[in-house]
Image (spheres, rainbow, N blue to C red):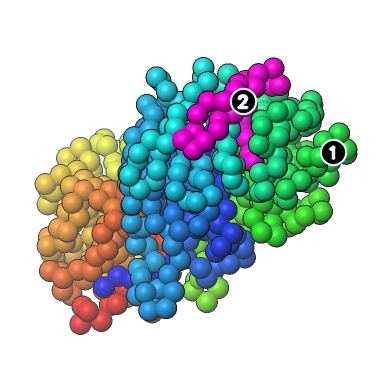
Amino acid sequence: MISPQQLVPPNPSTTRAQSVHLSYDRHHQRLAYAANNSVIIRPVDPTDATTVPTQFTGHGANATTVAEFAPSGNYIASGDVTGMVKIWDCAVLSGPAAADRDPFAQPTVKSEFPIIAGPIRSIAWDADSARVIAVGEGKDKFGRCFTWDSGNSVGEIMGHSGAVQAVSIRPQRPYRAVAGGDDKAVVFYQGPPFKFDKTLRGNHSNTVRDVKFSPQGTYFVSVGSDRAIVVYDGKTGDVLSTKAQAHQGGIYAVSWLSDDEFITASADGTLRQWKASALDSEPFTYVVSSKPTVDEQQLGVVVAGDWIVSVGFNGVLSYFTVGDAEVKHSVKGHQKPLTTVAVPTAEAVVSGSNDGTVFQWQRKQGVIQPFPQPGPRHANYVVDLIATKEGVQSVGWDDKLINGDHQATLPEQPKQAVYDAAHDLVYVVGESSITTYSGSSSEHKDKIALNYTASGLALVPNSQTILVLDATNNQVVVYEGSQEKQRWEKLRAAPVVVRVSPDGQYAAVADSFGKYVVYNVKDGSVVTSRWAFHTARVYDAQWSPDSKYVVSVGLDCQVIVFSIGRPAKSAKYPLAHQTGVSGVAWTDYDQGRFVTVGMDGVIKQWQVDLKQFD
């Protein structure tokens, strides 16, 4: 049995010049946001490493765009790029029900509705947690008002001539709604049922990025790319005051601190605190960076209890306290699909992603801690991470081997890297060659030219033997030094992964169909071919330190533990990661713990009961 232990979520997904709508649940102190193809719920407290975040993957392969808590805190409405909105249960359980719940279990979808023919950009609930308005980039219409349970219409979103970027519902009766978008207009609605009341034009000269009603509904405010702030009467929609050039960059988000004060987030890398009743008074400025770059452009903000939380273009969540201009916490993390993972020590986990970022996470008492340290940065896809005497080294599709302050330019796009601790050498395999580099200085040492397409390699401990995967002829090629010595029995499909056991006795080879053949390294004989439980391509695998087990992951989203002693028996966890598991590594083998990374951008920690193989 494989048991889930911990989930480390990705940071919010961001798009240049596109607002990020963060949502806050005041009942249970949680944040929700869209990340890749998922919706993430995490504790507001940035230091909380024990509460397991929730990952909702119900949108499938469609990228999520927005998520919004209902005022009750029991449901979330989330939207995706296809225009679908799903309502799902996010209630916090207590007592025996909470103890028995799988922390990685998917929340229950209550309802789902196709809203528009394009991405959903913003969602708003009414105070009764009964009605929902969803807006975005449609074709024939730009939004819809409906009841969350039945989908019945409770009004119409009219008055806009372009994509709608934001919507808000007055949290007090009489209910009102407001929306703003690409047509530079703010449209005011009365209801329910929500009906067009008036269009407010001429106050913004560029796209309206966000609109929000104050907590008591006294005001609502609109902000936009024109750097302007406009405050309106919450009941009538009349303009009360305007502030031009409120920031030195476009304003992307707004969140209310009280019924008279609100916070704005801007591309100039700052947040500012304003008074709705005195908009011309000097604002208080919160500084994310004194010299902001594109990465520090602030695209979203939410007031979450005692914290003001903003998100930058780089996905970093910056935490402020009211009245303190300096960042208290910066929560960094991956934004993109993860490609590889390494565990250099029992106290560290290193992960790499397809945008070239690498982070090192601390582990304390078996728990991965927040606040990772950035590692070497590649220009794009990180292919492999290897632990060496000098620390963790990485290779990427920018054709670089990065070793701290040292770098080496690779002759071709790498497919895998392996470290030879006995000789302090790094082997990097490409399609047509194997190159070796010094483990300490990254100095080029040797090159082996190949007359076939290689897909991976492995080193046999305490020897000069190298196993190379020949994807052209579907074979494993054995080298002694740089000389080809032997070819093993032909496989049914192209080999993609080879891993040699730490004792040097076995070589587990997986093909593109997910089937394993385990060879005896000494003579190339087949030990077993019964490891056939994957249903798609294998991405990664690792032997246990005692050479008894292999933990394997792949495109079929499964995590499988195989036993060399009992080849017909395995331990599985299906749907471990959304859209595929890309990397795996043992962390505490004596306790059966290992870590995986996936295309969903999530790091997960697991525990397997190895006694089942006895």
User: What is the magenta range?
Assistant: 184-213
Pick the front one: 411 or 258: 258
Residue 258 percent location from the top left of the image? 73, 50
Which residue matches tag 1?
278
Image quadrant where one finds the C terminus: bottom left
Q: Which residue is mark 2?
A: 186
Residue 602 visible, this orientation:
no
Position of residue 113 measured from the top left corner of the image (x, y, whole percent) = 34, 39
Q: Is residue 494 visible?
A: yes
Q: Is 46 situated left or right of 516 in this image? A: right
> Within the magenta stretch, is there residue 206?
yes
- Could you tell me which quadrant the N terminus lies in? bottom left
Task: Determine which of the numbered discs, if any, sits on residue 252 in the image.
Answer: none
For numbered disc 1, what is the local secondary structure?
helix
Classify 134 as above or below 1.
Answer: above
For the point 13% across and 65% down, the residue is: 527
Q: Is residue 247 magenta?
A: no
Q: Residues within 10 Å of mark 1 (few under 14, many from 20)?
A: few
Instruction: Name the residue: 83% across, 44% down.
Output: 284
